[in-house]
Image: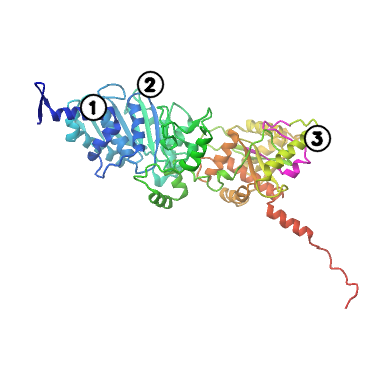
Amino acid sequence: MRLIDIGGQTIDIDEQLRDIERANCEESLYEFMVAAWKYVDPNPFVHGWPLEAVAEHLQAVCDGDIRRLIINIPPRCSKSSMTSVAFPAWVWAQRHDSPTSGPGVQFLTASFAQQLSLRDSVKTRRLLDSPWYQSLWGERFALTSDQNTKGRFDNNKGGTRLSTSVGSALTGEGGNCIIVDDPNAAQEAFSEATIHTTIEWWDSALSTRLNNAKSGAFIVIQQRLAEDDLTGHILSKDIGDWTHLCLPMKYEWTRHSVSITGWNDPRGCDDDGEPLVLVDANGRRIPRDSAAQNELTNKREGTLLWPERFGPKEIDLLERQLGPFAAAGQLQQRPEPAGGGVIKTDWWQPWELESYPPFDYIIASLDTAYTTKTENDFSAMTVWGVFSATMSEASSNFVGRSGKRESQRDREAMFDEAMRVKNMTAGMGGSDSTPRVMLMYAWQARLELHELVSKVEKTARRMKVDKLIIENKAAGHSVAQEIRRLYNNADFAVQLVDPKAQDKLARLYSVQHLFAEGMVHAPDHSWAQEVITQTSQFPKGKHDDLVDTVSMALRHMRELGMLTRQQERVTEMENMKRYTGKQPTPLYPV
C-alpha cells in the first residue's frame, strides 16, 4: 500500500489509480479490451481503428441506442475476443442497470460449432475470475456456485451467460442480449443444406428468444461467406431496424460504411474526419464533390483495413489461398469476386439516355416456376432489344423505358434520336453497324399459373415484343399452351427453346464474349441492377432465375444471326467480296 499525505488527508495511491482505471474501462469498451487483453489472448495486443469501430457499436447496444446489429469483418480481427468474450464481462461491470446494461443482463451466445461457443464461454469466465477484474468489479457481483459450467454460468444479480450452437434446441431458454458469432462455417459456405439449416434455426428458434422484444438486442457478427448466409438472409428480408457495420479488407468507396451512430469508415473521410462519400435516398454512395471523387478514386480506393496486422504481402497470400469467390466474401464482405464471376459487372454498358434506341427486333425470355411457395424458385422474365447506330437511322420502332411507344412527329425527331444513339455508341468499340442488345425490362416473382400467364402477356404487349421464348420444360409447356390458347391473336410469337444437354454454367459461358466485347447494355434502374447483380454472383448466388433468361435470350439471338460480333462481320464482308462462281473459261486455251 502506497500512501501520500495531501493537506492532512491520507491518500491511497494504488486505490486512486484503480478508481481511474475502473472509470476509464467502464466508459470505453475498447479501453476495457486493451486492459483485459492479457487475460483473453496470449498474443500481443495490436491497436487498430477496426476494433475501435466494433467496440463503439457494441457499446451502443449496451446503451440501448442499437437493438439489432450486424457486423461483417474479415477473419482474425479479434471479433470473437471482443464480442463474445470481453463484451459480456464489460456489460456486467456497468453501474447503470437496464435490460442490456449491468450485471443482471442475460446473454445467449451461439456459433456454428458448440466447441467454439464453449471456448469463448470459458475465456469469459476466466476473465471474470482474473485478479485484475476482481480487484475492480469483484464487489459488484459474484458467480453462483450452483450454476457454473463451461456452457452456462450465472451471477448473484440475475445475469446469465449461456452458450449454444446452430441447430441446438432452445426451448425454455432466452436472453436480453443474443450474440451470434460466426453462424456459418467457412468450409461449408456453399452447402445448401447447411445454410438452410442455419436460416431455419434462426427464423424458427433463435429470433424468438429475446426475453423482451422491445428492450432486448441481437448481435450478429461474421465474415461473409455466401449471398444467402445469415447476414444476407437477414438483410434481404428487410424486417426490423438493423444497423450494418461492414468492414472490407480493401476499401471500396461505392460500399462506404456508415451507421446510425454517425460513424463513417475513416478511409472515406477527409483530414477533418468529414465523409467524402454521401448516401442518397436510394442508399447509393456518391462523392461529396468533384475533388472528393478524385480523392476517392485515385487515393482512397483499395486502402487496407488494418495494415498493422494485414499488410499487402499478407493479403496477397490470403487472396491466393482463398481464391476469388472466398476472398470476395471473407475478405471484402461481398460474396462475389470484384466485378463479378462469369459475367463481370463492368462488362455491362450503361445506357444514360432518357429513351431507348430504336430496336430492330425485341425478344422476351421466360424461365417458369409457377408456384407461390417461398422455398421454390422464382418465375423470371427479361426483355431484350437488338439495335445498332446504323439501324437507328432507318427504324421507327421507338420504345421508351416505360415500355410505351414514343411518338415521332416528324423525320427530324427520328434523325436527332439516331444521331444521339450513333454518338453514344461510337466510342464503345467496333463499327456503327455492329449490332448491340439492350436489357429493356425484367422481373421475377412467385406466381400461380394464371397469374404468371397474365403477367407475361401484359409485359410482352407493353414492351412490343416480337417473340417470346420459353425454356422447353414441364412448366414451360403449360405456360406456352395457355398463352397460345388465351392470346392466339397476340402480336408476338411463342417458341419453346431446348437448352439440350448444356447446364446453366455452360450456357452463360457461351455468351460471355458478348459482355466482354461491350455488346450488352442496361439502363440505370433497380430491376436492371437486380439482373446485373444476380448475373455477377452466378454460380454462387442465391438465385439464378434471371440468369437463365439472360443466357437463353442471348444464345437464341446468336443462333438467329442477330448478334454478330465485329470480327465475324468483318469476316462475313471479306467473304462476300470473294468470287465464288465458276472459274471463267480462258479466251485462248493453251
Q: Residue furthest bottom?
A: 590
| Quadrant where the image shows the N terminus | top left
- Which element type, helix, strand or loop, lies under badge 2? loop
Left or right: where 371 falls relative to 354:
left
3D distance between C-alphas at marks 1 and 2: 29 Å
The residue wearing badge 1 is 23
What amino acid is labelled 1 in the image? Ala
The residue wearing badge 3 is 411
Q: Quadrant of residue 488?
A: top right
* Most foreground residue, 279 or 147: 279
The residue wearing badge 2 is 214
Labelled pair 2, 3 in contact (Cβ < 8 Å):
no
Q: Earlier in the sequence, mark 2 or mark 3?
A: 2
- Which element type, helix, strand or loop, lies under badge 3? helix
| Vertical arrangement, residue 133 with respect to residue 316, above or below | above
| Quadrant where the image shows the C terminus | bottom right
* Most foreground residue, 215 or 499: 215
Left or right: where 528 falls relative to 240:
right
Residue 540, given in percent of the width and then of the height, sits at: 50, 45
What amino acid is labelled 3 in the image? Arg
Q: Residues within 10 Å of mark 2 (few under 14, many from 20)?
A: few
Residue 170 visible in the shown view: no
Residue 529, given in percent of the width and then of the height, sits at: 57, 37
Q: Earlier in the sequence, mark 1 or mark 3?
A: 1
Asked if the stretch drawn in magenta spans residue 391, the answer is: yes
Q: Quadrant of residue 483?
A: top right
The magenta stretch is 381-405
